[in-house]
Amino acid sequence: MREWDDFDCTLATDLSQLPPPPSAVNAVTPWRTAIHHIAWGLCLTCFTLQFLYLDYLLPAIGTVALYLGFRALRDNNRWFRLSWYASICKVILLYIAYLLAATPFSDVLLLPRVTLSAVTMLTMLLGLWLGLRQVVRPDSGSPASAFWALVWYGVLLLLAVVQPDLGWPGALGMLAAFLLILCSLLRLCRRLDTLGYALISAPVRMDAGRVWRVSLISLALVVLLVSAGCSHAPLNGTPVEQNSDSPEAAAIRRELTDLGLPEDLVARLWPEDLLRLTGAVESTEPTGGLPMGDDPTNRRQNQVYALLFPDGSVQLLHAFSAELDSTFWQNAVTLRSNASLSEVTGRMFYTQSGVSKTAALPFSETVYSSGTDLFGLPFYSYQAKSALFSWPLGSRDRWGYVIAAADQEANPQTVLDDTLGYATSPRPAYPYQRPAGYDWTYGRRFYYGDGSGLIWKADEDASQNSSPSS
């Protein structure tokens, strides 16, 4: 029958290829695959490229390659098994480092994590050297390349501590030494293919291809999710109740409008913030509100006022529009002043699905260092209060204000310099970073002292108080 003739022909053809040629056997030996994984892992984890996220992608690939290499060797002796355990620790540390890099907490336990990562690499190289000494036949060559790899990495760590900047000559020298060690390791691998070795290939439940897919895809997905979550700080606004003012609040609003603040702005101030502004005796004229974006009529909410009190204290009020700014990803409002700021509060307003909502801003503090520059000239010290938030999707009529108490007498200069900045991130950033720069800033310089008028005290002669200048 014809089908039996075809079967006999196929069987004879396949049997004619047995045994396979030496090149085919060498290509699939577990020894060669394991050593190649380790060699590539060392290359990708010891050297990185600082562009196109290769400084994150290549070390991740190299770490998985090291794990696969030592996984295949782990059943041969205790040293290879030690290296395999160290490679597992390195994979775990990689996941931790990459996840923390997607959050504002990338510096958490940084020194212990870097130290532990260096120790795991030294352990892997030590285990590789001692493990090779046991499995390599005496006539196959010496595994000195693994020993020199251990020495090379130790020198690299020492230089990172005592001389981080090697310059081009030092960097090229370290690279040349590494390449020589790597070539020696690969030559040893080729000699073993012909002279022999004693190797037990460890059984695995998951093949190398699946390990690659599971580890790298899971790492990428988790990093993307964490990065997206940390780049969105929801406002969690609550509906604004349209209740009538108490007599006390209504009186404060009348005081503020009598001082020259716009009536529509005063009407929208939160009742809790109104209490801070009671008793003001003078208000500076507002800055000319700059139009935001392409809307020349959007001027009123981009202004700053300084409210003066009988004890000489100052309350700064910034009102601004954010209608044309980012709607979902991270935004930052930063109030910066050369005076000491305290009691900084902010509130955002928006409309979502026809409902007016409001939310308080969570401010944190940053102090800009001051001192003397390289030319011996002093520079100013600035204090900043900033808050991160994200606008809800579909929100509109977005605006807000920030109120802060300024201690004008804490600054030895005769000027109160105050700036509000607004920055947005159009997309999640990895590694995590706050919005860089400012989409827009506005502020004002208030003069005080020497009879310029910003300081107002009840016991002073009214004739000594001139109107504030801008």
Image (cartoon, helix red, strand yellow):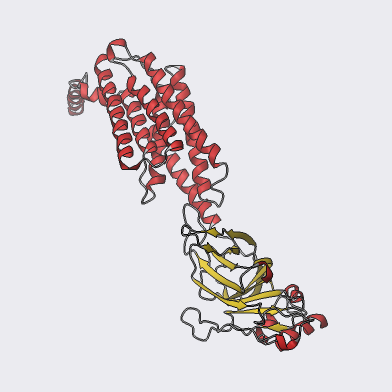
Would residue 205 be visible to someone looking at this image?
Answer: no
Q: Position of residue 233 (x, y in %)?
A: 58, 60
- The residue nearer to you, when weighing 281 against 360, is 281
- The residue nearer to you, when weighing 467 against 436, is 467
Q: Position of residue 171 (x, y in %)?
A: 33, 39
Q: Residue at 45% x, 36% y: name it.
A: 162
Left or right for 158, reference 105 = left
Q: Position of residue 58 (x, y in %)?
A: 38, 42
Quarter holding the C terminus is: bottom right
Quarter holding the N terminus is: top left
Q: Residue at 43% x, 42% y: name it.
A: 216
Q: Is residue 250 above or below residue 69?
A: below
The furthest residue to the top: 138
The furthest residue to the right: 247
Q: Residue at 79% x, 84% y: name it.
A: 251
Left or right for 439, reference 357 = left
Q: Is residue 28 above or below residue 139?
A: below
Picture quarter containing residue 48? top left
Would residue 341 be visible to someone looking at this image?
Answer: yes
Left or right for 188, reference 274 = left
Q: Is residue 208 above or below residue 74?
A: below
- The residue nearer to you, when weighing 458 against 423, is 458
Left or right for 397, reference 98 = right
For the image, the number of numbered tags is 0
- The residue nearer to you, when weighing 305 against 120, is 305
Q: Position of residue 377 (x, y in %)?
A: 50, 62
